[in-house]
Image (spheres, coloured by chain):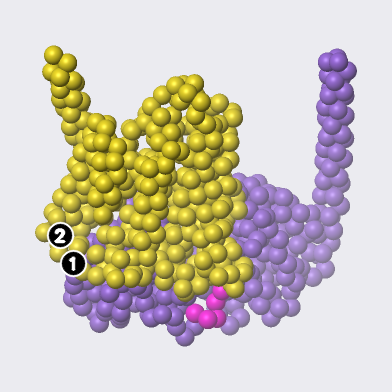
């Protein structure tokens, strides 16, 4: 009885393996021919007129943040009469974007607007695209600088620090104790921002005292408990700055049902969906982040300027970005969106991310 | 309240082991009271402000739920390391249901959470009972498996407060007669588990299994069924904790409950549940949960710097166990001496 079972199994394995080989062979040869044919087609397109076929490639699909940014990009492309499309992986894994980049290259699109899941993993694919004449703009999350033509930076560290200091100073009347609820103690971005905020407070707001920086580890529960501890430890606390989306929403959740609601002001970097409940119930007056719609809008105009040859990505190049006005390319082929955007009760309803 | 319960129940079974256990709980409760008193002296807000009093009761309640289930599993000489992942998966399931079916009445969330957690616990129980692999290994596997499913399903998504009904969220922070609802839920669960473990035949059999699994089998106890029940209860309580988490924190990401398994084991062990089974009480585990969480909350209030807090907590856990161990050893020697003298 044993012998026939074994052979059957072996037969199945062999058949599967053979099938796999055949399929692999087919698909790889298909790829080769396609690549050759469409690359030629792309060149033809370039020769006739500017190819304003712009593809947005977010980190993953179904992500509300990128839905917002890419809608901004689609608006811009509709304004200047290009054609917009969006492709992307279901999951934000490092190399998931490679196949989409390859497909866009083969289709000979005008430009790719990418938010990179990994700074290095998609580099080769992007450079192949550029060799085939596709302009590459990164936004939100950059690749290594040598793999793209332009990076649209949402905000500078200084701008982020400045807006939070301004918001808290305005909310507490420019005097009193404030504390910072950060991410983890070794979070590079947050530490840089906090250092700048400390300098700005010392220089411009002598009556505001920063009593403590606590770390919520970007964990809802830890941030929540740290907020409770801050409020108990400093009865005279006037404000909390939380430069991390997890921290600011956890702190808002605690404050919203605390006896200190309305007495201790809270601001920081948050997303509208996370903060909506707390802005509506009055716990939080205003918080900051960049506007992803503007980011996508600017990225689309930057792609257009690259395609039409108005800019090459060299420092000092300038281009027009529709309603947002004129932008200049900075060092390392980077364009800065501008100051962070302030969300409050009046405008939070306009956003869904 | 928990203490009087345990004492009343213990006198019913006035055996030497149980009176020893009672002592352990008294010691842990004294440590808890000490932490509260010292912190309150340093900062009266810790106990006397509205927020402070509420947080003192509500914050440990989540861990209490998980620790009670964990204690029941540990008493059978097993361990359930998957509770944190069960909690996370349940919290996200409930959050997703609220978001996708906004008409869902919130009490249903509790039913679903407990049932789903129980089902995940059943998987653990069946694997441990039938695969004959130590529960440490099985539940370490499901710890990663459940969390993996959670991360795959959730991705970078997040359930926000505005996705969940206001009544449900209010449950997480409101009180009746200054006792938070969450604490009431936890105490009801504790009372039920305590009643089961002390007075019910099945509950007593957990101790028998933990003391000597082979003897329990030879004696004809339904070892396999008890084992599965223990894991189902542990899973169901972790599921309940997941629902309570969503209500209290108002936000659910893929990282809910990470590390809870070790805190739950820690709470049970601090509370006098022997890690090799057979002794300890769910009340001890509950007090252990209160002590562990309250120490965590007290340290920032008394001004211990952030970086040192975890080290201090670790030292205190070891200290509590060593002290507890010394006391237990002395008691044991005393009992042995008594036996000797009574024989003479």
Q: Secondary structure at mark 1?
A: helix
Residue behind mark 1: B48
Residue at the spot of label 2: B40
Q: Quadrant of the C terminus of chain B?
A: top left
Image coordinates of residue B217 in percent, x first then y, are 50, 24
Which region shows up in magenta? A348-353
Is residue A352 rendered magenta in the image?
A: yes
Kindly identify which chain the residue marked by label 1 belongs to. Answer: B
Q: Position of residue A171 (x, y in %)?
A: 30, 80
Mark 2 nearby-residue class (10 Å; few <14, some 14–19, many ≥20): some
Question: Residue A178 or A327: which is nearer the viewer?
Answer: A178
Taking A196 as reference, is B7 above or below it? Answer: above
Q: Quadrant of residue A18?
A: top right
> Does residue A147 appear to the left or right of A263 in the view shown?
right
Residue at 49%, 21% in the rendered image: B218
Q: Residue at x 32, y 37 (%)?
A: B280
Position of A46 compared to A259: left or right?
right
Residue A158 visible at all: no
- Report the residue at 53% width, 63% height from top: B109
Chain in yellow on the image: B
Q: Given contact means CB atoms under 8 Å apart, are the residues at marks 1 and 2 in contact? A: yes
Point out which mark residue B113 bears. none
- Lower sequence index among marks 1 and 2: 2
Figure quadrant of residue B178 = bottom left
Task: From the top left corner, tell me how far across and down residue B35 is, in percent.
Answer: 18, 51
Q: Chain A appears in which tint?
A: purple
The residue closer to the viewer here, B160 or A72, is: B160
Identified at 25% across, 82% down, the residue is A173
Q: Residues within 10 Å of mark 1 (few under 14, many from 20)?
A: few
For marks 1 and 2, give the CA distance. Answer: 8 Å
């Amino acid at each position: 009885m044993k012998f026939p079972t074994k052979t059957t199994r072996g037969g199945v394995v062999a058949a599967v393996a053979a099938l796999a080989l055949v399929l692999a062979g087919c698909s790889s040869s298909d790829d080769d021919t396609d690549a050759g044919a469409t690359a030629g087609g792309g060149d033809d397109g370039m020769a006739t007129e500017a190819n304003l076929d712009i593809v947005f490639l977010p980190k993953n699909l179904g992500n509300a943040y990128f839905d917002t940014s890419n809608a901004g990009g689609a608006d811009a492309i509709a304004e200047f009469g290009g054609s917009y499309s969006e492709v992307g992986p279901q999951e934000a894994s490092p190399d998931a974007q490679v196949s989409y980049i390859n497909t866009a290259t083969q289709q000979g699109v005008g430009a790719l607007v990418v938010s990179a899941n990994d700074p290095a993993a998609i580099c080769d694919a992007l450079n192949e695209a550029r060799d085939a004449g596709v302009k590459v703009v990164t936004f939100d999350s950059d690749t290594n600088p040598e793999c793209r033509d332009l990076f649209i930076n949402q905000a500078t560290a200084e701008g982020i620090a400045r807006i939070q200091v301004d918001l808290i100073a305005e909310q507490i009347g420019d005097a009193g104790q404030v504390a910072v609820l950060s991410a983890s103690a070794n979070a590079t971005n947050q530490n840089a921002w906090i250092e700048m905020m400390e300098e700005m407070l010392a220089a411009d707001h002598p009556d505001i005292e920063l009593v403590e920086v606590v770390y919520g580890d970007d964990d809802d529960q830890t941030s929540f408990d740290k907020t409770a501890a801050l409020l108990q430890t400093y009865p005279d606390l006037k404000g909390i700055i939380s430069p991390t989306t997890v921290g600011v929403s956890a702190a808002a959740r605690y404050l919203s049902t605390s006896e200190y609601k309305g007495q201790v002001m809270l601001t920081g970097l948050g997303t509208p969906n996370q903060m909506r409940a707390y802005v509506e119930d009055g716990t939080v007056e205003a918080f900051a982040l960049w506007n992803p719609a503007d980011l996508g809008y600017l990225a689309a105009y930057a792609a257009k300027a690259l395609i039409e040859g108005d800019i090459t990505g060299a420092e000092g190049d300038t281009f027009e970005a529709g309603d947002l006005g004129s932008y200049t390319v900075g060092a390392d082929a980077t364009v800065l969106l501008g100051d962070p955007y302030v969300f409050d009760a009046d405008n939070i309803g306009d956003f869904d991310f | 309240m928990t203490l009087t319960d345990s004492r009343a129940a213990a006198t019913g079974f006035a055996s030497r082991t149980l009176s020893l256990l009672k002592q352990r709980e008294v010691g842990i409760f004294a440590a808890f009271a000490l932490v509260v008193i010292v912190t309150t002296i340093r900062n009266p807000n810790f106990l006397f402000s509205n927020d402070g009093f509420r947080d003192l009761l509500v914050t440990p309640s989540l861990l209490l739920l998980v620790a009670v289930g964990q204690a029941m599993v540990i008493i059978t000489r097993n361990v359930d390391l998957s509770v944190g992942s069960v909690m996370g998966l349940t919290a996200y399931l409930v959050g997703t249901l609220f978001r996708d079916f906004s008409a869902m009445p919130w009490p249903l969330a509790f039913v679903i959470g407990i049932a789903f957690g129980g089902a995940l616990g059943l998987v653990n129980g069946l694997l441990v009972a039938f695969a004959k692999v130590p529960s440490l290994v099985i539940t370490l596997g499901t710890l990663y498996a459940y969390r993996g499913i959670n991360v795959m399903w959730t991705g970078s998504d997040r359930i926000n407060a505005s996705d969940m009904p206001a009544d449900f969220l209010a449950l997480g922070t409101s009180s009746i007669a200054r006792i938070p609802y969450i604490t009431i839920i936890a105490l009801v669960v504790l009372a039920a588990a305590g009643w089961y473990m002390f007075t019910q035949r099945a509950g007593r059999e957990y101790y028998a299994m933990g003391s000597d699994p082979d003897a329990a089998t030879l004696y004809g106890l339904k070892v396999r069924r008890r084992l599965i029940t223990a894991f189902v209860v542990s899973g169901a309580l972790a599921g309940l904790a997941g629902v309570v988490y969503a209500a209290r924190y108002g936000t659910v990401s893929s990282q809910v409950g990470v590390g809870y398994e070790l805190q739950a084991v820690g709470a049970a062990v601090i509370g006098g549940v022997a890690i090799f089974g057979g002794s300890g009480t769910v009340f001890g585990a509950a007090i252990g949960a209160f002590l562990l969480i309250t120490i965590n909350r007290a340290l920032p209030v008394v001004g211990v710097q952030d970086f040192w807090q975890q080290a201090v907590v670790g030292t205190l856990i070891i200290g509590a166990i060593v002290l507890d161990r010394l006391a237990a050893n002395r008691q044991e020697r005393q009992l042995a001496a008594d036996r000797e003298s009574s024989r003479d």
